[in-house]
Amino acid sequence: GAGVSQTPSNKVTEKGKYVELRCDPISGHTALYWYRQSLGQGPEFLIYFQGTGAADDSGLPNDRFFAVRPEGSVSTLKIQRTERGDSAVYLCASSWAGANYNEQFFGPGTRLTVL
Amino acid sequence: GQQVMQIPQYQHVQEGEDFTTYCNSSTTLSNIQWYKQRPGGHPVFLIQLVKSGEVKKQKRLTFQFGEAKKNSSLHITATQTTDVGTYFCAGHGNKLVFGAGTILRVKS
């Protein structure tokens, strides 16, 4: 079956704008994660969903960042009033039930550039 | 908070030479995972280690989890050009924390 998909693959926006990034996890995976990866760094944890609820949102840098997963499948990461420092690759990953003890399958990422 | 350090940052080897990357956590881990990211790609899961002192092998790759469950290593024997990429360890304490990765370049 299909892997994790993310749209758009690239997003260029202006400082102060609002953006939405979408993630379609592997069918049947109940756990979904968002990460942010800057050049030369490892993925930085943002938020983890188990089903529809955010089980751990401690990685969200501030209240401009918000994520939802209303039906327990597709998730949207929302960034308000974007800043140049938000520029990075945003990675989504999913895994089978069992929280963080399972292999995570990563999507190709969305490269966000804030001008 | 939980921190995961990884060394070296970068290694350039001749094809056929061995390669090792090391990972150290500031806290005791429940498990550790290793991922490989090819240039321009996304992280791909390699393995998970759970038990203290555990050693696992995948062909030319050997993974080790320390006795104290705070460090780990990945060793590649006789590197090939297909091994090129960035290798990340990711330690699970309260959540999965990735190291900064080791970039491996292989000269043929």
Image (tube, coloured by chain):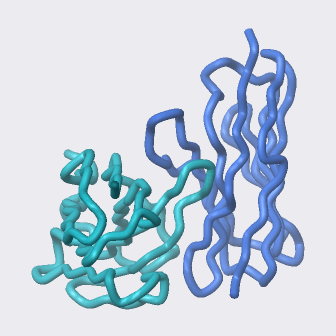
Residue drawn at x 33%, y 75% is A31
A16, above or below A53, in the image: above
Residue B15 as seen in the image, left or right of residue A115: right
Asked which quadrant contains residue B12, the reply is top right
Q: Residue B68's x, y, as percent?
A: 87, 77
Q: Using the image as rendered, state which of residue B53 and residue A93 is in the foreground.
A: A93
- The image shows residue B80, relative to residue B83, as above or below, that is above
- Which residue is at the far left? A71
Q: Is residue A46 left or right of residue A101?
A: left
The chain shown in cyan is which? A
Question: Which is nearer the eye, A1 or A47?
Answer: A47
Residue B52 higher or lower than A84, as above or below:
below
- Colour used to depict chain B in the structure image: blue
Name the residue at 26% across, 71% down: A16
Residue A65 or residue A96, whichever sits in front = A65
Residue A39 in the image: x percent, y percent?
A: 56, 49
Task: Farthest residue to the top: give it.
Answer: B108
Name the residue rendered at 67%, 80% in the picture: B30
Position of the C terminus of chain B, as image quadrant, is top right
* Viewer-nearest residue: A28 or A6: A6
Q: Quadrant of residue A21?
A: bottom left
**Dividing the picture into quarters, in which one does residue B1 lie?**
bottom right
Instruction: Give residue B62's position: percent from left, percent from top.
Output: 77, 44
Q: Residue at x 35, y 50 (%)?
A: A111
Where in the figure is residue B72, as x and y percent of width and height?
Answer: 80, 61
Q: Say if B14 sits above or below A86 in the image.
A: above
Count the marks: how many?
Answer: 0
Q: Is A26 on the left or on the right of B28, as rendered? A: left
